[in-house]
Amino acid sequence: MDKYVIEGGRKLYGTIALQSAKNSVLPLLAASILTEKRVTIRETPQITDVLCMIQILRELGAEVRFSNGNVVVESADASCHEISSVLTGELRSSVFMLGSLLTRFHRALIAYPGGCDIGLRPIDMHLNALKQLGVSISERDGCIFCECDKLRGADILLDFPSVGATENILLAAVKAEGRTVLTGAAKEPEIVDLQNFLNAMGAKISGAGTDVIEIEGVKELGGVSYKPMKDRIEAGTYLIACAVCGGEVETTGLTPDNLRLLLHKLRENGCKIHTKNDKIRIESCGRLKCNRRIETMPFPGFPTDLQAQATALNAGAEGGALIVENLFETRFKYVPELQKMGADIQVKDRHAFVRGVKRLHGASVVAGDLRGGAALVIAALGAEGRSEVLDLSHTDRGYADFRGKLKKLGAEIKRVRV
Ligand code: UD1
């Protein structure tokens, strides 16, 4: 188990070439078995969630190569429709495989999915939608078994815009007989990316990015070579890190519209933000004012995946902030670790009351989930003195070369084997 050793207080300067979006690449990998033709996903980041998804595809019988950032999937010989609990336990995105497996084999058996420990995360909306597409669902030894003679298009209404359920419906309806109209869909940019990817394979999907998506089932899907969108959460993480440390950082490859609310909040903190085409530049003097209130919401609201990093920022800023987490029940588990660094934060249910302190101090802290881990790294970069962030298995799930990229910006950060 590795740890980061971080000497706080260095300003950050430079440019970050963003990785492709984790939350885009994972559903694209799930979609790769929808055809027997070759699928190439270019510029894929080396993160453990991706490696785990590749492992799942191999278990199904697909041939997968991952070199020079390109993942090439040949699934002509794929024949297995079962995913073992070992892999689903590690990766919640394995739930997307339901839609893909049903389209490809008309049956799927998967163990209940895992992922970050940030709340209940049920999959009732996924399963209800699949039922409406003609799938019968039963439980066998803690696994979900889905089966259908054929998938039939349907009118589906989601009562909450679940990202994963929306993506699963796209994957299950893409070759269904007739038309599916999904109302109440999630509007995240990664869903637009999935639509573009599937359409490049020959699908007929429109409306992604709005709350109504129409899917006209097609008979066949072909191969594709596709470059996914850049990672808005990775971008936000480096921008917040620069805000906290002071300095000047530019991200490239991501349209600023993908992060509108974060950029607004960073301006409130006192940072200067400049945007042009696919570039976002932040200038920070490192002395920040708290945001009065940040409330996570489905896109285009403030992303829950940047909530922890924003709390770390506010912990060392002037004033007070109320952070409200609306998406997941227990997404403040990193707070006790921030408190070890001197943060003054009280959590009650889905609310965190932050009283900014002048400066956090170094401490030994443990990362318990992906974004909470990133928040601890940010806090350590801005803190006075040395910190250790233990258990990098979580940040490795979502940040390719986290240490290398921060070091290039001027951070003093080492990765040490424990
Ligand atoms: C995706 C993202 C994750 C992000 C989240 C919210 C991926 C791989 N992960 O996760 O990084 O934090 O969107 O932006 O893209 N829910 C139900 N029943 C369901 C499905 C969801 O109650 O069937 C609830 C969840 O418990 C949660 C909320 O809906 O409280 C949002 O979940 P959802 O949008 O589905 O998130 P994920 O797809 O799991």
Image: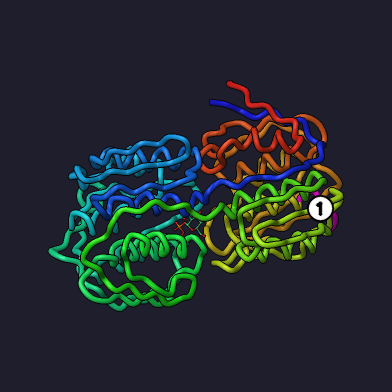
Q: Is residue 321 visible?
A: no
Drawn side of residue 61 relative to residue 416, left or right: left
Report the side of 118 relative to 104 (left or right). right
Judging from the image, the colouring scheme is rainbow
The answer to whether residue 6 is visible is yes
Q: Is residue 388 magenta?
A: no
Q: Residue 188: where, in percent of width, then height? A: 51, 65
As drawn, the residue found furthest toward the top would be: 418
Q: Which residue is mark 1?
A: 283
| Residue at 52% over, 58% down | 328
Q: Residues within 10 Å of mark 1 (few under 14, many from 20)?
A: many
Q: Tell me the chief SS of the magenta region.
A: loop
- The three-letter code of the residue at mark 1 reads Glu
Question: Where residue 109 sits in the image (x, y, percent)?
Answer: 23, 50
User: Of residues 63 and 382, which is closer to you in this image?
Assistant: 63
Q: Nearer the viewer, residue 36 or 184?
A: 36
Q: Image quadrant for the C terminus?
A: top right
Magenta-colored span: 315-319
Tag 1, which secondary structure? strand
Where 365 sits versus 322, above or below? above
Task: List x then y, in percent, for residue 236.
Answer: 65, 53
Q: Residue at x 32, y 51 (%)?
A: 32
